[in-house]
Image (tube, grey):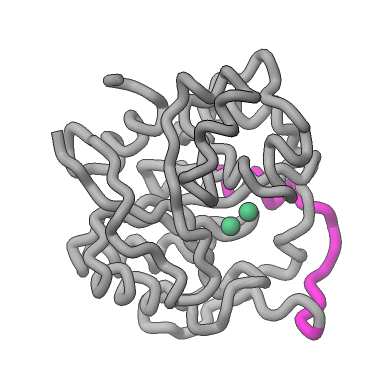
Amino acid sequence: MIHATYDLHIHSCLSPCGEDEMTPSNIVAMAALKDLDIIALTDHNSCKNCPAFLELAREQGILALPGMELTTEEEVHVLCLFAELSDALHFDDYVYEHLQPVPLREDIFGKQDIMDKEENITGHVGLLLINATTIHFENVYGLMEQFHGVMVPAHIDKSSNSLLSNLGFVPGDSRFRTYELADAGKRAAITEKNPYCADCRVVVNSDAHRLEQISEPVETMEIEQMNAAAVLDFLKGIHR
Ligand SMILES: [Zn+2]
Ligand SMILES: [Zn+2]
């Protein structure tokens, strides 16, 4: 078993709330500086900066996963993580078709830049990415099966945009096996009120919107091999 450090929740400049300094190149450089083993890029409702991110991470020898922080119809944030870029980009197409048709207003929300690995801006996303999609929380697990990804309800201990704050409970038919906490110290309180969570794995990520917020190499996960498929297996609760 390998104890790998990770940060699986990082926003780039493509997220309207992500700082301009969060270029794929700067994120990977910071992760290398911090000596993280595994990183994932999870912009709001988009995977369009993942190609540059993955290429840069490969050059640095960091294991990187393509991902997205999906906003469900109920405004619940869910990390969707993939082993293969092609799966992530197919899911990106699906989510784009399920965005509300609200154009981005840069003066209010900031830019949504798509970049290549040399930090050239190669495009923009025209629809506002932080709105809710029309995808229901109850359908996310099935979608992840269809697109070969894994769902991780994000920051469920937060008082907004989380499974517990927006739905108020863990649905009885839930099948996710890992959830994210913003504060690792909240686990006991969460499992006391939500027995489902007692059997799940927990990840604690930075949810970085600025470079300095990217995690220190503190949190670890136990994986069998240093590859993306093994990380997905961990998040799916396989090999307990
Ligand atoms: Zn979030
Ligand atoms: Zn986030």
The answer to which quarter of the image holds residue 202 is: top left
Q: Does the magenta stretch include residue 197?
A: no
Q: How many numbered marks have been drawn onto this rendered protein structure?
A: 0
The span shown in magenta is 90-107
Residue 39 coordinates in the image, percent (x, y): 35, 56
Q: In the current view of this chain or complex, which residue is farthest to the top?
A: 173
The residue shown at (37%, 83%) is 118
52, above or below 87, in the image: below
Quadrant where the image shows the C terminus: top left
Q: In front: 208, or 71?
A: 208
116 vs 132: above or below = below
Nearer to us in this view, 93 or 107: 107
In the image, 94 versus 229, the foreground residue is 229
Residue 21, image x and y in percent?
A: 49, 83
Viewer-proximal residue, 198 or 238? 198
- Residue 40 left/right relative to 157: left
Q: In the picture, residue 228 is in which quadrant? A: top left
Q: In this view, does 133 lie to the left or right of 23?
A: right
Residue 203 higher or lower than 64, as above or below: above
- x, y percentage for residue 1? 14, 33
Above/below status of 194 relative to 63: above
Image coordinates of residue 111 in percent, x first then y, are 67, 79
Residue 104 lies within the magenta run = yes
Left or right, 198 with respect to 35, comes to right
Q: Which residue is drawn at 63% across and 31% down?
A: 140
Kindly give the residue lying farthest to the left in the view shown. Answer: 1
Residue visible at 18% across and 32% down?
224
Q: In which quadrant of the rendered view does residue 98 lie?
A: top right
Side of 93 relative to 228 (left or right): right
Quarter holding ligand 1: bottom right
Q: Residue at x 24, y 55 (%)?
A: 37
